[in-house]
Image: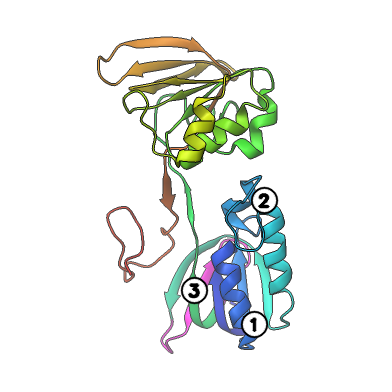
Amino acid sequence: MSDEEYDLIIIGGGPGGMTAAIYAGRAELKTLLIEKGSFGGQITDSLDVENFPGSPHLSGQALMDRFKEHVTLSDSVSFLTTRVSGIDVAANHRRIVHTRRRGDFTARAVIVDVGAKPRQLGIPGEAEFSGNGVSYCATCDAEFFKDQHVFVLGAGNQAIENAILLTKYASKVSVAVMHEEGVLDCNEVDRREAMANDKIEFIWNSTLSSINGGDSVTSVTVRNVLTGAEEQVDATGVFSFVGMVPQTDILPDTISKDVHGYIKV
């Protein structure tokens, strides 16, 4: 365990975590900000953030670079890239944050801002082809599917926004939607844009029952949720946007969570 004690440890370097770090720095609290990956969180996958006050049409990465630059203005805040494996309470009421590779760290208080990860449906082929035809980030992987046919799973804002983005690269984007024809869960602006895009095909009342291939994805099996009828369709990529799962498994059982794993507030 590190001999150094912090006033505050913040777990999660997304927008919320970095905002907390800014305020902690202003209060001159000795603070450690821990992030397992790239600082900025999921918003860094967004090519265009349109609704951040004062900064319209700024990429998520550029916005988070500004956040991190703001945090670095405080000498009392330190950054650490590692994965947190658990949190305990010591006998002196200090919090002990365990990490997988960098040891343990002690603080008077801990802020948990771990965010969420993409939900997996568990359909055959999803795990097997993850990173090799199955993706959860069009901003990251769209360019690998230039002039190819890809599928998008989902009907919410994230799914439709990414479907629109994929049309800049793919020759055809098929969106499997479980709702009846014309019903999407996204905002109206994206709905109109997607409906008017000639490269986007909506397959209503449908989902995928399997993702097929050898070394990589070569086809998907589309199932009609009303009739149960299935059809195999050639495609080389699947982008899934069917919700998120909170990353709260590191928290002790003393922290109350709902049935979905979200912290009760």
Name the residue tied to disc 1.
25
The residue under label 2 is 57
Q: Amino acid at mark 2?
A: His
Which comes sooner in the sequence, label 1 or label 2? 1
Q: Calculate the distance from the C-alpha at mark 3 to the C-alpha at mark 1.
A: 14 Å
The residue located at (25%, 14%) in the rendering is 227
* Secondary structure at numbered mark 1: helix
Quadrant placement of the C terminus: bottom left
72 vs 15, left or right, is right
Asked whether residue 104 is in view, the answer is: no
Where are the magenta residues, as a range?
Answer: 90-105
Q: Which residue is mark 3?
A: 111
Marks 1/2 in contact by CB < 8 Å: the verdict is: no
> Can residue 138 be seen at all in this image of the molecule?
yes
Between disc 3 and disc 1, the foreground one is: 1
> How far from the left and from the top, in percent, is residue 8?
55, 81
Which is nearer the eye, 14 or 157?
Answer: 157
